[in-house]
Amino acid sequence: MKSAAVAAAALSGGQIAFAKGKDAVSNSPLKGDDDGLFFKISLAEWSLNPVIRKGDLDNLDFPAYAKDKFDIHAVEYVDQFFPSAEKAYINDLKKRTEDIGVKNVLIMVDTAGSLGESDEEKRIAAVEKHYQWVEAAEILGCHAIRVNARGRGSELDVAYATTKSLITLGRFAADYGISVIVENHGGFSSRASWLAGVIRATGMVNCGVLPDFGNFVVSRQENYDLYLGMTELMPIAKGVSAKSHEFDEEGNETTKDFYRLLKIVKDSGFRGYIDVEYEGRTLSPDEGIMATKNLLIKAGKSLES
């Protein structure tokens, strides 16, 4: 990543953008809401994507569903479940969450284009399409938008393009007190050392990562080590996604060690939100969400002793 870092430094001209005006950018948990864990639990809307896609749950009703069904009082949205980012819709959603006391944490943006696009015109267009979600996040009181580091070309080419995009987007978001965080989400971004290099190359305090427990598959030929990847990403994390798939009879996730993962998270000094993101097929979405939440609590409390 030395080449990417040098390129990014040249791009940024040594300028560091500091997000301003919002405590939420640090991703501090809500005061007075202490349940004995070192982190706070949120619900990723993607956990309910089969239900939403079937039309059985509307995006506007998602916060109330999270609170009433799972006793989870913080939510993370997915942009593709919004009919639009128009202010009237966002303000309606904001009012609903305020009325029931649910915290809006972040918006996951997947439909705005590739920030690592090699075509300059398309890359700039993708950056600008993310602006509306920064504005929506600010209205909702979120601390961040989650973006993807995708593009075509060599790892250096994609790193260079993504770094440029994050610098521009990060500067825009800083004026709204919003962080721009990248998930390890396939391709080069699932190679944690690559992603960490890109983020550090931006030189921006409001750019970080959203490490996902389940997304360290770079390609069919390459799986990045989950525990190494989490260790590398946590120092620059502004959120964590506890992805789960299958559980045994004792409630433990069978494909990854939540106890070991949460120790890595805690040892990094992270004290923000960890989202529940169930993607399994054996349990229903509701059952999987509860199983993941219960495991997070059990594993988290084991680290307090």
Image: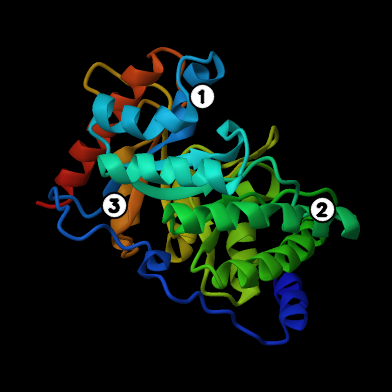
Q: Report the quarter where the N terminus lies.
A: bottom right
Eye-nearest disc, 3 or 2: 2
Q: Which residue is mark 2?
A: 117
**x and y percentages locating residue 27 in the rendered image:** 37, 62
Mark 3, residues whose alpha carbon is within 10 Å: few (<14), some, or many (≥20)? Answer: some
The residue positioned 46% from the left and 14% from the top of the image is 56
**SS at circle 3:** helix
The amino acid sitting under disc 1 is Asn
Sequence-wise first label, 2 or 1? 1
Q: Residue 263 shows which numbered tag?
A: 3
The amino acid sitting under disc 3 is Lys
Q: Residue 190 shows which numbered tag?
A: none
The foreground one among 41 and 193 is 41
In the rendered image, the vertical position of residue 300 relative to residue 276, given as above or below: below
The residue positioned 48% from the left and 30% from the top of the image is 59
Kindly check if marks 3 and 2 are in contact, taking CB atoms under 8 A apart as contact.
Answer: no
Eye-nearest disc, 2 or 1: 1
The amino acid sitting under disc 2 is Glu
- In three-dimensional space, the C-alpha distance between marks 3 and 2, rounded to whole angstroms, equals 36 Å
Sequence-wise first label, 3 or 2? 2
- In three-dimensional space, the C-alpha distance between marks 3 and 1, rounded to whole angstroms, equals 29 Å
Left or right, 204 with reference to 219: left
**x and y percentages locating residue 78 in the rendered image:** 54, 38
Q: Residue 49 shows which numbered tag?
A: 1
**SS at circle 2:** loop
